[in-house]
Amino acid sequence: MNMGMGMMKKMGQMGSGGGGPMAMMQKMMGQKGESSGAEGENPMQHMMGMCMEMHAEMLATIQKTNALAVSATPALQPLFLQWLDTLSDEALQLLQKQPGMESADLAKALQISGEGATYLLASLCNQGKIRLRAEGTQTT
């Protein structure tokens, strides 16, 4: 996700001069007299390097996803769902005792990540077991 956002930002910067995709490509390839890489570097080599870096990032992400998928066997799914139900019940009990509890405090009490607590809260809300309240924060 970060890689895609970074690439979009770079493309936006390159294309900000107008001229459409062809002008952007020429700029990326260094054909407008601008140096695109290290001093004396062939523009095609620079472009190839950029593509190889992007490919390496994508490959690493795919490998990580595959590693997670391999460990998520069908035999583990019922155990995971049982654990998630138990965790949801614990979260619900905590929220009944402390109705205004913040998600960060819930995460700490359950010893899970903030993202995990947010997932549990959204799940409980979708099931109609809790109501969520959002408040804006003031920035200084």
Image (cartoon, helix red, strand yellow):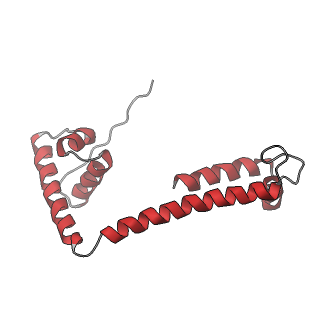
Closer to us: 135 or 93: 93
Residue occupying image coordinates x 17% and y 55%: 88
Whole-percent x, y for residue 78 in the image: 19, 71
Describe residue 69's horizontal placement relative to residue 128 as left or right: right
User: Residue extending furthest top?
Assistant: 140
User: Residue extending furthest front?
Assistant: 40
Count the numbered circles shown: 0
Whole-percent x, y for residue 10 in the image: 68, 49
Closer to us: 1 or 95: 1
Residue occupying image coordinates x 32% and y 42%: 134
Describe residue 41's horizontal placement relative to residue 56 as left or right: right
Q: Image quarter for residue 94?
A: top left
Q: On the rendered image, what quadrant is the C terminus found in?
A: top left
Q: Decide: is 9 above or below 85.
A: above
Whole-percent x, y for residue 117 in the image: 26, 48
Q: Decide: is 90 above or below 66.
A: above
Q: Is residue 73 visible?
A: yes
Describe residue 111's horizontal placement relative to residue 9 as left or right: left
Q: Image quarter for residue 50?
A: bottom right
Residue occupying image coordinates x 25% and y 76%: 74
Residue occupying image coordinates x 71% and y 47%: 13
Q: Is residue 19 visible?
A: no
Whole-percent x, y for residue 35 in the image: 83, 46
Q: Image quarter for residue 107?
A: top left
